[in-house]
Image: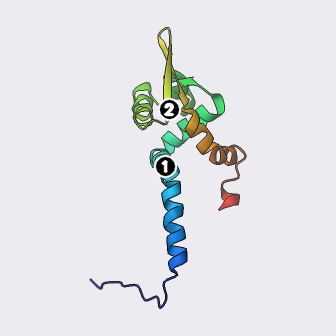
């Protein structure tokens, strides 16, 4: 396998230093967004997150009816999202309602607004 090496003639040390500082300052946000995008990278989970964004809270049965999936399948996706810290739950009597954690709601708002207006392709 051929090794690829950098062929730049001049390194802009000021730019490199600035970029390192920018990455360090953005580290927490990058980690937060990376986690969200990783979990939302699944079509079903993205639909669930979008629905939770739009409706504020839904239970497993609601999601099951909306997405035409059985409750155990929905529960598996919800478990991954909950374990990832993106959603939270609230028990009301026998029903567990799920909602987006506030920080992720704010973080994903721009994406979901574009989805709601069917504008994703326009912004690509």
Identify the residue position indicated by label 2 in the image: 87
Residue 42 rendering spot, x and y as whole percentages: 47, 46
* Disc marking residue 95: none
Residue 93 rendering spot, x and y as whole percentages: 50, 8
9 relative to 52, above or below: below
- Label 2 sits on a secondary structure element that is strand
Identify which residue is drawn at 62% across, 28% down. 56
65 relative to 114, above or below: above
Depth check, front residue: 69 or 8: 8
Identify which residue is drawn at 26% across, 83% down. 1
Q: Which residue is situated farthest in the left direction here? A: 1
Identify the residue position indicated by label 1 in the image: 28
Q: CA distance from mark 1 to mark 2?
A: 18 Å
User: Between disc 1 and disc 2, whose residue precedes?
Assistant: 1
Q: Which residue is situated farthest in the right direction here? A: 117
- Quarter of the picture containing the C terminus is bottom right
């Amino acid at each position: 396998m051929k090794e690829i090496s950098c062929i730049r003639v001049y390194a802009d040390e000021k730019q490199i230093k600035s970029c390192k500082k920018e990455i360090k300052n953005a580290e927490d946000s990058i980690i937060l967004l990376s986690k969200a995008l990783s979990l939302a990278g699944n079509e079903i989970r993205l639909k669930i997150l979008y629905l939770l964004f739009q409706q504020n809270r839904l239970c497993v049965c609601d999601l099951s009816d909306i997405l035409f999936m059985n409750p155990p399948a929905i529960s598996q996706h919800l478990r991954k999202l909950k374990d990832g810290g993106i959603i939270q739950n609230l028990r009301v009597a026998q029903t567990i309602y799920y909602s987006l954690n506030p920080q992720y709601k704010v973080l994903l708002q721009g994406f979901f607004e574009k989805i709601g207006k069917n504008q994703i392709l326009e912004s690509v």
